[in-house]
Image (cartoon, helix red, strand yellow):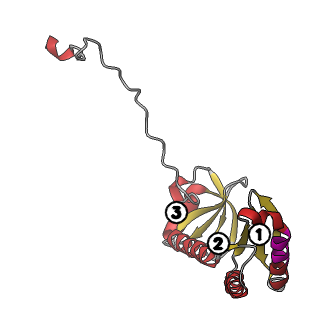
């Protein structure tokens, strides 16, 4: 029997390092506490019809909820005593999920689309870019206009400035300037947002 209590050794003749025995973290439940999870001795009870019964023992309230085939759900835990309501918790949770999904569906994520221009852009190319810009504004997106200078175009920056002023004037009815034109190296950046 003495061989059972002989400690095991590594190949190096040392005792193995023992990891600390950590209990897994308690699973945190999302949402309100229900039925037996409510730890308070007394609660303020509202029944399934919305009638306020005042302060009631928690055990009695749970029995009342079970008698009508429903759950006791903690509505306002920060009150003293906490406010609990008799309701169908499954339906309550389902309707909350539906509301959250509906809110996510209605939410619009604003994207920033980029339009690149050159100072000597042709009229037809300019018109195509303006139509694309108008479509972006109708979809509710912002537009970042990047005007890039190459080589000797840097010597004639007034051409680019006139072009950006023309863009501002052309989109004035359906967009506003969010960030005015500013130089970033060899390019000028301007951000427009829909009205």
Residue nearest the viewer, comparing 192 with 56:
192
Does residue 162 show up magenta in the picture? yes
Depicted 161 relative to depicted 134: above or below: above
Q: Residue at x 67, y 86 (%)?
A: 128
Q: Is residue 81 magenta?
A: no
Task: Find disc 1 in the rendering and name its residue.
Answer: 191
- Residue 103 image position (x, y, % from top left): 63, 75
Q: What separation in Å lies between label 2 and label 3 (alpha carbons)?
A: 47 Å
Q: Are marks 1 and 2 in contact (CB under 8 Å)?
A: no
Q: Nearer the viewer, mark 2 or mark 3?
A: 2
Mark 3 highlights which residue?
Answer: 63
Query: Which of the image's four quarters has the C terminus?
Result: bottom right
- Whether residue 174 is situated above or below residue 74 in the rendered picture: below
> Magenta residues, as a range?
158-165
Q: Position of residue 85 (x, y in %)?
A: 62, 66
Give the numbered dot on residue 109: 2
- The residue sitting at 75% across, 56% down in the picture is 185
- The image quadrant where one finds the N terminus is top left
User: Image check: 52 left or right of 26?
Assistant: right
Q: Secondary structure at mark 2?
A: loop
- Residue 133 visible in the snapshot: yes
């Amino acid at each position: 029997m003495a061989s059972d209590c002989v400690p095991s050794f590594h190949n190096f003749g040392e005792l193995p390092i023992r990891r600390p025995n950590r209990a897994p973290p308690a699973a945190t439940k999302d949402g309100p506490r229900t039925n037996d999870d409510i730890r308070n001795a007394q609660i303020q009870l509202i029944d399934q019809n919305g009638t306020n019964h005042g302060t009631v023992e928690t055990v009695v309230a749970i029995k009342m909820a079970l008698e009508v085939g429903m759950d006791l759900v903690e509505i306002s835990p920060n009150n003293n005593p906490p406010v609990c309501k008799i309701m169908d918790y499954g339906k309550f949770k389902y309707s909350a999920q539906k509301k959250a999904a509906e809110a996510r569906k209605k939410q619009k994520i604003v994207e920033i689309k980029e339009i690149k221009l050159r100072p000597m852009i042709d009229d037809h190319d300019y018109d195509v870019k303006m139509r694309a810009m108008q479509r972006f504004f109708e979809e509710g997106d912002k537009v970042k206009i990047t005007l890039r200078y190459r080589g000797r175009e840097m010597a004639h920056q007034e051409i680019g400035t006139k072009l950006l002023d023309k863009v501002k004037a052309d989109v004035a009815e359906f967009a506003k300037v969010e960030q005015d034109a500013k130089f970033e190296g060899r390019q000028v950046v301007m951000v427009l947002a829909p009205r």
